[in-house]
Image (cartoon, grey):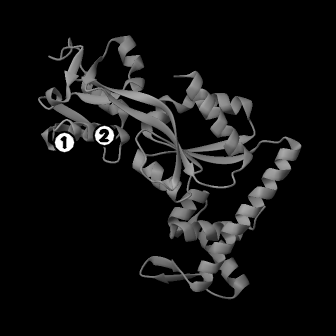
Amino acid sequence: MADRRLQVFHTVARLLSFTKAADELHMTQPAVTFQVRQLEEQFNTRLFDRTHNRISLTEAGHRVFESAGKIFQLYAEMDNSVRELTGDISGILILGASTTIAEYMLPVLLGDFKEKFPDVVIRLKVANTDGIVSQVENNMIDLGVVEAPVSNKNLVVEKCREDELVLIVPLNHPLANNDVVSLAEITKYPFICREEGSGTREVLIESMHAAGISNTDLSVSMELGSLEAIKGAVEAGMGVSVLSSATIVKELKLGSLVAIKLDPPLTRPFSFVHQKQKFRVRAMDELLNFARNYCTNHP
C-alpha cells in the first residue's frame, strides 16, 4: 500500500484540520499528529505552519501534497490494472447521500450491490444536498447521490430519475379532500420545513419564486432535519409539509397521512455526482453501472 504517513498527511492537508482528518480516517488525533511528525522528521522540515489553532501548508508541504496526489493516482492505476487482470473487484468506496435518498432509495440498491460484490466495502455518509456536493468537490467522498439540481460544472452529474414532491396533511385537515393544491394555498397554514441546504427545501423555494410567491409568505412553525420527525409532526396536526412521495409510502398504506398533488407540479432530479476524473478504480465503475441499471429498472 501507499505510505500510511503520506495518506494521513494528505488528508490533513486537504482538510486543513487534524481533528477532521482523524474523524475521516477513524483514528485518534494524537495518532494523526504522530504520523505527520514522522513524515516531517523524514524530510527534516516542517510541512505545516501551526498558528492560533489554525494550520497551513508550508512551501515544502505544498510540494509534498502535490506529489502525494500523483503517487496515489499511480498506485490506484496499478491496483486497478492488476485487479482487471485477476478479475478481482474489491476495495473501499465512500458514498455520500442526501437524507431522503439514504433512507428510502439506497438500502435496496446497496443491498443488491453487496450481494453481487461482497468484497467491496461501502462507507456511507449522510448529509443534506449542499453538504454532499461540497464533499464531492473536496474529494472527501467518491460518489454522491443528491436530490436537487447541481450547478457546479466541474462535476459530472448523471440524472437517475425524477422525484415528485407532494403536500402532506393530517387526516382531519381542511385540505385533506383536495386532489390538487396551489402553492399559494399552502401559505395559509402552519408549515413544517426542512433545514437549510436541503434539496427539498431548495426546490420548494425556487418553485414559489417562479410562481411569484416569496418564501417569507410561508408560515413556518417548525424547521426539522429529520423526515420521520416531520411526518410525525404533521400526523400530530402541528402543520403541513412538502416531502418526496417516496418517503410516505408506509404512511399512505396505513392511512395516517394524506398526500395532495401540487399545482404547478413539483419535481426534482435524483442524481449521481462525482469528480471529472480520467481514472477511477474498477469498484467505482461497477457501482456506477449498478446504480444506472437500478434507476432504469426501478422507475
Q: Farthest residue in the bottom direction?
A: 44
Q: What element carries label 1?
A: helix
Residue that appears at 32% across and 38% down? 203
Q: Is residue 296 above or below residue 64?
A: above
Q: Earlier in the sequence, mark 1 or mark 2?
A: 2
Density class for disc 1 (Cα within 10 Å; few <14, some 14-19, many ≥20) is some
Q: Is residue 268 visible?
A: yes
Residue 231 is left or right of residue 279, and the answer is: left
State which quadrant residue 201 falls in. Answer: top left
Q: Where is residue 38 in the image (x, y as percent from the top left)?
A: 69, 78
Residue 123 x/y as whole percent:
60, 45
Please tell me which residue lies in front, 13 or 214. Answer: 214
> Residue 120 vs residue 226: left or right?
right
Q: Residue at x 58, y 25 (%)?
A: 296
Which type of secondary structure does the marked residue at label 2 adopt? Answer: helix
The residue under label 1 is 215
Image position, residue 259 (x, y; %): 30, 18
Q: Which amino acid type corresponds to the residue marked 2 in the rendered image?
A: Arg
**Residue at horizontal 63%, vertical 71%?**
9
Q: Disc 1 vs disc 2: Cβ atoms closer than 8 Å?
A: no
With respect to residue 51, does 206 lie above or below? above
Q: Residue 177's image quarter?
A: top left
Between the residue at mark 1 and the residue at mark 2, the CA separation in whole angstroms equals 10 Å
Quarter of the figure that contains the N terminus: bottom right
Residue 260 shown left or right of residue 190 in the figure: right
Q: In this view, does 46 lie to the left or right of 232?
A: right
Foreground pick, 243 / 53 = 243
Q: Can residue 108 be seen in this view?
A: no
Q: Mark 2 points at which residue?
A: 201
Residue 234 on image: x %, y %? 25, 26
In which quarter of the view is residue 255 placed? top left
Identity of the amino acid at label 1? Asn
